[in-house]
Amino acid sequence: MEANAPIVKFHCVAKRYGDGALVLDGIDLAVAKGDFVTLIGPSGCGKSTVLKLVSGLSPWTTGDVTVAGKAPRQARDRQAFIFQDATLLPWLTAQHNVELPMRLRGDSAEQRRRRAAEMLALVRLSDARGFYPRQLSGGMKMRVSIARALSVSPELLLLDEPFGALDEMTRNHLNEELLALRDRTPFTALFVTHSVAEAVFLSNRIFVMAARPGRLHAEVRVDFPYPRESALREKSEFQTKVNEVSRLLHQVEEVAAR
Amino acid sequence: MKRASDFWVWLLPVVTGALIIALWYGVRAATGLQSWILPTPLEVLQAAVRERQLLLAAAGNTAVGALLGFLFAGAAGWVTSIVLGSSLSLRRSLYPWLLVLQMTPVIVLTPVIVLWAGAGLPGIVTVTFLISYFPVVANMTQGLLSTDRNLVALFRMSNASRFQELLLLRVPSAMPYFLAGLRIAATLAPIGAIFGEYMVGSSAGGTGGLGFLVYSYNTQIKIPALFATALTSCLLGFIFVAGVALFNWAVLHKWHDSYEQPDR
Ligand SMILES: Nc1ncnc2c1ncn2[C@@H]1O[C@H](COP(=O)(O)OP(=O)(O)OP(=O)(O)O)[C@@H](O)[C@H]1O
Ligand SMILES: [Mg+2]
């Protein structure tokens, strides 16, 4: 395999659930190693479905999807999924939740404990390791979820509106943390959000999707260098990008309304 | 704040109880029924004190039958649900027949039970089991099938085996359902045991339980004592329910929302 082969590749992919209408059509997408790719688009346009295809949770109808050159299911050990709600097991402490994927793949207890402690420290939750999910705030739960996903050092991280349920300040903080974590444990990200500002802050590539059937409407490149810091949000270039993406979103929404 | 609300929590049922007793005396006075038809609460208590040794011994015997039947129902219910929960085709083929078993009135089965399990304790345990088994299965199976879809996706994404998924995800997340089933079973088990004693019991060598006392007080027309037997059965039922509540607390209080501490 060539060094810069895409880690995720969609070739002319179409998808329908059962014998329903087409949910995705003609998706061509190549995510390169190190990319931070964001999908944004109207509700129901198939963003989550794209992630389900990549993770092998759901089959596609026609075309081809590969992850690291393999069928998605064969590449699961290289990816991790972060859901909108933190999806922690309520009967496990933060620490044991972080250990879960390592436990499932059979790491030793000692290895798991050490790695979980390390990951909880990275998301600044060392003091909460003995807490059960119901004792954690929404933001803390999400940080546990991020620690859990990164504990297995995935090459590819899939995130489906991970910060959608959080207030703006927490969301901004976690955005900055997520980028900082990428320097410590490098990963390629495929990210779904409804927030244009979040998309611009995090990504180097944004795909605006149109609905019914879901298509890639336009790609916007965001060339601000990493590491990015919160001051970036104040810059006028940042605002210009946000406006550009918003305009594209309006376009696809107007088409949908007609 | 705390004191006041606790006070009401205790006071309300006491007030309701007092009203019911007043109504009871009222009915007695208005109808002029005699004590062997409708004894007053006081007469019931007096009978309970008078018959305390018989009642206690019988309650002990009933408790043994009820507990054994309950434990079997809990264990068998647990295993059955895991079997049902792990395969759709097994569920399709077995569940209707479990329903049929549940619909069959146990009273119809009692002659067969005596024939197969024998009179006395084995028969009583069988009757108790039959009465308290189904709620456990129904609840736990529902629980196993109600696992959060995202959590299932998380396990699939982590390449978890079906066994890991069952053991580490489906069973723990079904625990609140299982315990709800046990709670129903706990209210049914003493009733089942008493019914069993009445139908298939034996009183040989002082092994007669409350069901036997129902029979013997009834034939002797000792109606206050019969009411006292009912009172004793209630107390036994409460002990069973309290036992399950304790178990429920031990399993769930650390993580389940039903034990969320109110901030005060
Ligand atoms: N399991 C399913 N079975 C049938 N149809 C589904 C299923 N999941 C999604 N769909 C349909 O596929 C379409 C795309 O859904 P998807 O969840 O991918 O949208 P989305 O872009 O993530 O939306 P949102 O922004 O609201 O999360 C929708 O029309 C939805 O009704
Ligand atoms: Mg979605």
Image: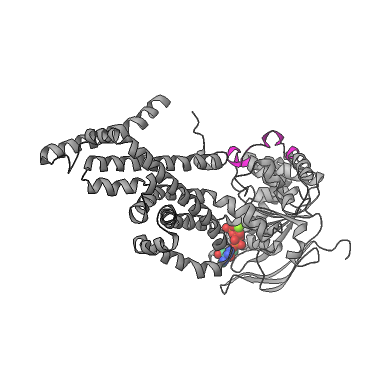
User: Which residue is located at x 42 percent, y 64 percent?
Assistant: B101
Q: Residue farthest to the front? A: B205
Is B32 on the left or on the right of A171, as rendered? left
Residue beneath the point at 39% across and 64% down? B112
Percent across and percent down for residue B34 are: 13, 40
- Residue A92: percent from left, percent from top: 63, 44
Quadrant that contains the N terminus of chain B: top left
Residue A214's quadrant in the figure? bottom right
Q: Work out whether residue A29 can be spotted.
A: no
Please tell me in which quarter of the rendered image ligand 1 is found. bottom right
Residue nearest the viewer, comparing B205 with B14 = B205
Count of labels in the image = 0
Task: Note whether residue B106 is visible.
Answer: yes
* Side of A97 where B1 appears, left or right: left
Q: Which residues are magenta?
A: A120-139
Who's the residue at 46% across and 64% down the image? B98
